[in-house]
Amino acid sequence: MTHLFPNYKREPIDLVRGFGNYVEDQTGKEYLDFTSGIGVNSLGHQHPKLIRALEKQMHLIWHTSNLYSSKLQEDVAKKLANNKNYLAFFCNSGTEANEAAIKLARKATGRSKIISFQQSFHGRTYGALSATGQEALHEGFAPILPDFQYVPFNEIGPLKKLVDQDTAAVMIELIQGEGGVLPAEVSFVQQVAELCKEQGTLLIVDEIQTGIGRTGNLYAYEGYGIEPDIFTLAKALGNGIPVGAMLGKKELKDAFGPGSHGTTFGGNKLALRVAVAVLDIINDPNFLDKVKQKGDYALKSLSSLKDSSDKVLDVRGQGLMIGVQLKDQDTLNATVTNLQKKGLLVLKAGNNTLRLLPPLTIEQDELEKGIGMIKVELLDNK
Ligand SMILES: *Cc1c(COP(=O)(O)O)cnc(C)c1O
């Protein structure tokens, strides 16, 4: 008997403990973790520096309201701006960060149209859901918000036709995560940024999955030679303590004046104390270089499957965000189940894609071990 809504299709294992890049289920079985709780535990489980940070804050104060100043929020905001011209708003999840982005874009421009991309994923609350370009996720929830439109990803033509002086924002994931680990092309993104500039439209980059070091840069946008007007963060920012953030250019500040937007828990002291420690570890050139190196190794190693396995159609990604597109849904389901039995946790994404989001702290030997298991599984043509 379950007391839970059946809105998730759950595996029968219950992960009750994690250590480093491994997790353990209720029976004591160990798994190498190539999921990081869907890109959340980027520093693995029980990282000693994060435990120390959380413990220290636990004995000071847990929560204040946003009626009071917060040096901690200032510190995290400064770290997130990373020497650029951004202000931060803190919330508790990815979808809330995108709600803030959509509200800020509409208010700052006085325009209503928001354009996003087919197969995109931006969250489940009404604004973020309305920006999500997947009809299946809208089903039964009508009416979604007006003035949201979707265009094909990586094609500038259809976007050009829609963006005009009524367009508040274009919203994009630089690597579509849930959609199937689909990277946006550099020239496409640069044209999108240019088009937005011409029309006075704001460019919102959803970095909820790609941000905080996942691609080997602090933010994926750094690899595209653009600077978004607004970008959003959540998942890895608190390494498992819920926290989200919306960053926007300083010029937008008047649209979010006192009382315009807010949330009780946003900027919670436990979450932000952990965020400081997360950013101090990840936003370090040596750490990010290692993510790039491990990512390059993984992508290269898995790419050989394109020729050697008839189950594999494509291998793509950046840093430690990697997709292995398989030939059909049954193959994907069987692969995930078999790997789980053998002690490796992996994720699914759209387009029959096996998605790998290991902790950024994964060791080279652990990476080789996991990739070895995936290769054996996909080369097995039984
Ligand atoms: C996970 C995700 C979200 C939603 O975040 P929640 O914290 O689940 O609300 C939004 N956008 C992208 C790109 C994501 O990967």
Image (cartoon, rainbow, N blue to C red):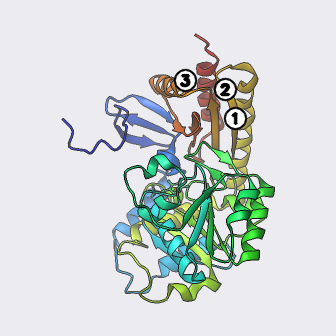
Task: Work out which residue is located at the far right of the displayed protein and give it.
Answer: 187
Q: Earlier in the sequence, mark 3 or mark 1?
A: 1
- The residue mark sitting in front, 3 or 1, is 3
User: The disc labelled 3 sits on which kind of residue?
Assistant: Thr
Whether residue 137 is situated above or below residue 312 in the rendered picture: below
> Which percent across, then down, holds residue 375?
64, 23
Q: Position of residue 268 (x, y in %)?
A: 40, 71
Task: Classify the position of the N terminus by image quarter.
Answer: top left
Residue type marked 1: Val
C-alpha separation, residue under disc 3 versus residue under disc 2:
10 Å
For this view, does 262 lie left or right of residue 362?
left
Disc 3 residue crowd, few under 14, some 14–19, many 20+, Cα 10 Å:
some
Q: Where is residue 270, by image quadrant?
A: bottom left
Task: Tell me what residue is drawn at x 45 percent, y 49 percent.
Answer: 137
With 13 as the anchor, is 350 left or right in this view?
right
Query: How far apart are the alpha carbons under marks 3 and 1?
Result: 15 Å
Q: Which residue is mark 2?
A: 312
Residue that numbered label 3 is attached to: 331
Depth check: give the residue in front, 195 or 318.
Answer: 195
Q: Any atom of ligand 1 within 8 Å of the CB at mark 3?
A: no
Residue 175 seen in the current view: yes
Residue drawn at the location 72% of the way across and 70% of the way down = 227
Report crowding for label 1: few under 14, some 14 to 19, many 20 or more residues within 10 A (C-alpha).
many
Whether residues under marks 1 and 2 lie with C-beta atoms below 8 angstroms apart, the answer is yes
Q: Position of residue 229 (x, y in %)?
A: 66, 74
Element class at badge 1: strand
Q: Secondary structure at mark 2?
A: strand
The residue tagged 1 is 315
Q: Tell me the distance, in whole angstroms, between the alpha carbons under discs 1 and 2.
A: 8 Å
